[in-house]
Image: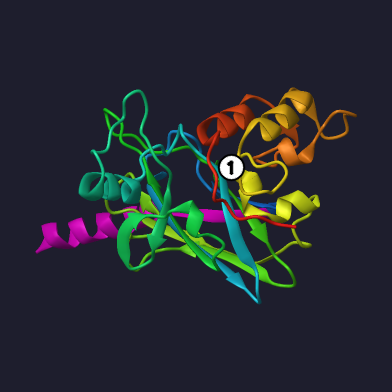
Amino acid sequence: MKKIICLLAIVALSAPMFAAEITITAEAAGGNLIIGYTSDMADGDPCLPVGIALKVTGNGGAMITGVVDWDKVEYPVYLDYAYTEETEGDGYTNDPEWEGHPFAAAEDAPGALDPATLPASEVIICMGRLTDPPSAGPAEATLVTIAVDCGDGTFDVTEEAMYRGGIVSALVGTDLTVVPAEGVTCDGTGGPACWECPSQLVGDTNNDGAVNFIDLNDLKAAIFTSDGDAAYNACADFNRDGSVNFIDLNTLKQNIFTSGHETCD
């Protein structure tokens, strides 16, 4: 009995060591919502996350209009995309890097989001780490950037714990306290008129629903410029980060000679 009491006392004393806090961050800037997290831990702490599942909800007419960018280093494994590839595609691969994106189609079922189905008032994010040996993620990270139209509404970014388990610690038994980001506001898209059109995100500078030589020429004229430069063209800034560079060139390259995208006036 004494041994049991001593063991319970040790467990009680050590319990706070396995409690940690993660704060979800969400900042609206230039027509985008940049989502990440901070923590009360230092890099290398084994209690830090190994898997992350979040729900982004638009309120009062706020909409997610496109996917812009996502972490490919710290949390490069996308389980919903993997599910879709394994069940409907040619298999999930990490050659040369894990393929796909971290956006899921539904909160209550597995499967990748098709970005062409946007805009939507809700998006699920699911991403994780798979390292050898197993390791936790960093103390803070930027996870995804999505294009948004706030209007007069707001966004909430919370754990998606119903189906995917929310934010999961790398240390088994750790009780992570997660602080959501709620009531995030922004003023419209915060960018030029072309950013109002989802097709701009895939390389369509003139919003005509097709990616072709017109868009390539616009990009070429603005390449290696930044917001404030005379030659900067925000419509060729496909990830809306204030610079036209190889990231935007790769976006256009992936979508060149495609059509049928949404057109906008």
Q: Residue furthest right?
A: 230
Residue 1, x across and y down, in percent: 9, 64
In the rendered image, which residue does mark 1 sit on?
A: 202
Using residue 243 as the reference point, say whether residue 119 is left or right of it: left
Using residue 236 as the reference point, say whether residue 169 is left or right of it: left
Classify 114 as above or below 244.
below
| Residue at image coords 70%, 57% | 264
Classify 41 as above or below 158.
above
The local secondary structure at tag 1 comes to helix
| Residue at image coords 53%, 36% | 255
Quick check: can you spot residue 249? Answer: yes
**Quadrant of the rendering where the C terminus is positioned:** bottom right
Residue 107, x across and y down, in percent: 38, 66
Amino acid type for the residue under numbered disc 1: Val
Front residue of 107/195: it is 195
Front residue of 110/166: it is 110
- What range of the chain is rendered magenta? 1-27
The crowd level at tag 1 (other Cα within 10 Å; few <14, some 14-19, many 20+) is: many
Residue 178, x across and y down, in percent: 48, 60
Front residue of 38/51: it is 51
Residue 73, x across and y down, in percent: 46, 31
